[in-house]
Amino acid sequence: MRAGFIGLGTMGGPMAANLQGASTALIVHDLHRQAAGRHEAAGARWAATPREVAAAADVVFTSLPAPPDVMAVADGPDGLLAGFRPGAAWFDLSTNSPAVIRALAARCAAAGVAFLDAPVSGGPKGAASGRLAIWVGGDRAAFDAHRAALDAIGDRARWVGPIGAGTIAKLTHNAAGAAINQVLAEVFTMGVKAGVEPLALWEAIRQGATGRNRTFDRMGDHFLTGKYDPPEFAFRLIHKDVSLAAELGREVGVPMRMVNLALAEMTETLARGWGGRDSRVSMKLQEERAGIAPLALDPASVRAVLDRDGS
Ligand code: NAD
């Protein structure tokens, strides 16, 4: 199996090195040749263009900044699409746009090439250590065929669904992470300005109900199963807590945009008469607005995932 790798930056550099470490013959390309120094020193072949990479490889990986960069590598007389042979596969490890991905997949399919979106999560440390999630969308057979290469890059390669599914998972994950960090910044500055020493505050909150849980695990109990009755923690009580926190923010003079937005949202939920339901019942409002059918997964299917993957 000959693999090509384009985009040897913060993430791509170490991912390509791990692929090479798993005895894969590698052909590499980047806008800047010095990015390939360590790979060439370890025996990788340099290609002057993406086309040359595609012509020499059975499978190509790209790790590029943004959708226009992926298009730049795909198109033109020196692009990947000009070099691929039928039967080849292209895994885009970049965080890309689902629309761009689907358009590229259709063009690749017409040339007999399997294009899969395969964004990664784990940061540069994960890229170096191999502790990296890879969320793949596209042809399942191509995913299975190149599983060994994916396993050389990350420890959690997962086929998520049809083309674009990996990227949708990645965008869901990163939007959640970013929004959570904004809220954490807000509430933590409130706690510090209200007078608690930062280390003591952090030590305390990481031991709380939210602190002890993996961020997404508790979604299984309520959001996925649609089970909000009887409450574990009544909605009117969490509404009271967030009202008190917003009040404290006002008292100590800390702007709390996200918390006040959450509070307005929660007040709308309360006005539905749902104060006696579980504290996560605002999801019901959002399901209505999103125009999706209420989620009602079998609790056994949720349990099976937690048992299989750990909680
Ligand atoms: P980066 O800017 O460090 O690396 C990108 C590399 O691509 C650079 O070496 C650059 O020279 C090369 N490149 C750009 N355009 C090119 C072109 N037309 N032809 C050839 N090479 C080209 O970026 P990064 O942090 O490694 O991120 C890569 C992708 O991974 C992004 O989509 C990013 O969102 C995603 N990602 C990043 C992280 C992270 O923590 N850095 C984590 C997960 C996912």
Image (spheres, helix red, strand yellow):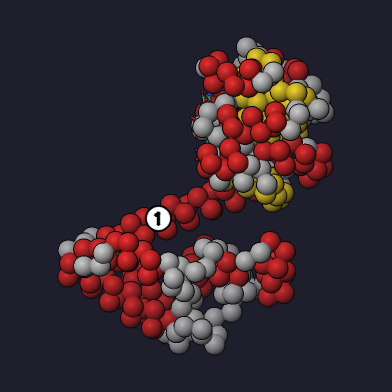
Quarter in which the N terminus is drawn: top right
Q: Nearer the viewer, residue 72 or 91?
A: 91
Locate residue 8 relative to residue 116 in the image: left or right.
Answer: left
Instruction: Find residue 6 and report its image quarter.
Output: top right
Secondary structure of the residue carrying numbered label 1: helix
Q: Amino acid at mark 1?
A: Asn
Most foreground residue, 269 or 231: 231
Q: Residue at x 59, y 74 (%)?
A: 221
Q: Position of residue 250 (x, y in %)?
A: 19, 68
**Residue 200, how many percent across, how many down?**
32, 66
> Residue 44, located in which quarter of the rendered image?
top right
Residue 95 vertical placement versus 108 (above, below) = below
Q: Is residue 239 above or below residue 224?
A: below
Tell me the quarter of the image containing the C terminus: bottom right
Percent x, y for residue 100?
Answer: 59, 36
Q: Residues within 10 Å of mark 1 (few under 14, many from 20)?
A: few
Question: For the point 57% across and 26% down, which residue is it?
Answer: 8
| Front residue of 253 and 198 | 198
Any part of residue 60 in sight: no
Q: Which residue is mark 1?
A: 181
Residue 308 percent across, percent down from the top left? 72, 64
Q: Residue at x 34, y 71 (%)?
A: 263
Q: Considering depth in this image, is 301 or 74 the residue closer to the camera? A: 301
> Is residue 127 visible to us here?
yes
| Horizontal side, residue 160 vs residue 202: left or right | right
Q: Residue at x 46, y 74 (%)?
A: 209
The answer to which image quadrant residue 236 occupies is bottom left
